[in-house]
Image (cartoon, grey):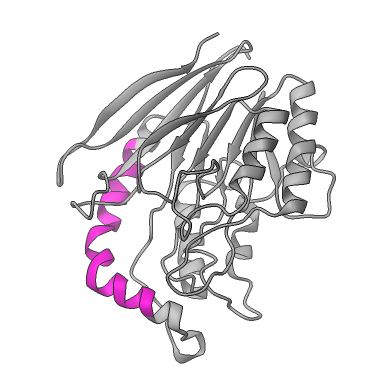
Amino acid sequence: MTTPITVAHLTDVHLGPIAGFGPRYWNLKRLAGYINWRRHRRGAYQKSVLDRIVADMQAQAPAHVVVTGDLANIGLPQEHINALGWLRSIGDPDNVTVVPGNHDIYSRVGADPGTHRWAQYMSSCAEGAAYCGGGADFPFVRLQGRVALIGVNSAVPTPPLIAWGRVGRDQLSRLAGILDRLGSEGIFRFVLIHHPPLPGQADTARGLRDARALEAVLARHGAELVSHGHNHEDTLVWCRTAGASVPVVGAASGSLGRHYKSEPLARYNLYRIDGPPWRIELVGRGLAEPGGPVVELERRILAEA
């Protein structure tokens, strides 16, 4: 790679307000989620804050933006439509990639296309499709120079008060092959998923049910970077592999504008990737205090050439 590539990472933006919640989509899970949003979340996750985060992000001129799920709140069709409009506002599908979260695939929507409305933003590019083997929506591969963005879906409809995810055997098998094929060509493998991918990163009701299996795939077949959302926390853990350990980075919500529970305020990450040999710099930018400006919060090297 002759010049570094910068990839911006946003997650868990929880766009409001909730619209289109008619009787057709009523069920216990959505009713509970709607009440929680009305009482607590709508005042915490603020579109005005997200707009400031996005403006600052765009001023950094990243080559690509990735969004690791939870654009919606209770998975309504109108939320999916509104989220598509928001995705279009931050960039075209060549420059923006999304994977769904549990609030996007919250509960079944019948014949409605749901998150498939975002297909242009979560599908392989022409060159990336060659690494996937065809026939399935996930994982998908999008290439930015020598960087491959690999979208994995962990979101499935779940019962009330449950937010766990699952990748599934078929997707894990395809992911293993994709990692091998990309790795054999020396391409940087950047895995995107909503749920934290490793065991112990979330409790049973919220975690990835097959995290141990995903960890094994990453350990055996390798990757250079994994980014996720879901926990609304800024975290860095490492997945041990036969080679170098893989940094696994979680990010806070991109729209939290006031103190809520123990969550950090709104943030996004920039990954500056150079190589090979690969060097990864992480720069975190966001709010240091409610109502404050967007500032640099963190800068660290995740991998050194």
The x and y percentages for residue 88 are: 50, 53
* Quadrant of the rendering where the N terminus is positioned: top right
Q: Quadrant of residue 54?
A: top left
- Residue 20 shows in the view: no
The x and y percentages for residue 209 are: 58, 54
Q: Residue at x 47, y 85 (%)?
A: 27
Q: Quadrant of residue 133?
A: top right
- Is residue 169 placed above or below 161 in the rendered structure? above
The x and y percentages for residue 170 are: 77, 52
Task: Give the total number of marks visible in the rendering.
Answer: 0
In front here: 2 or 73? 73
The x and y percentages for residue 204 are: 48, 57
- Is residue 290 placed above or below 46 in the rendered structure? above
Q: Residue at x 73, y 55 (%)?
A: 137
Q: Quadrant of residue 57?
A: top left
- Is residue 102 placed above or below 129 in the rendered structure? below
Magenta span contains residue 191: no
In front here: 40 or 86? 40
- Is residue 135 placed above or below 193 in the rendered structure? below
On the picture, is 203 further left or further right than 138?
A: left
Task: Report the span colored magenta.
Answer: 32-56
In front here: 62 or 11? 11
Q: Residue at x 51, y 64 (%)?
A: 104
In front here: 137 or 171? 171
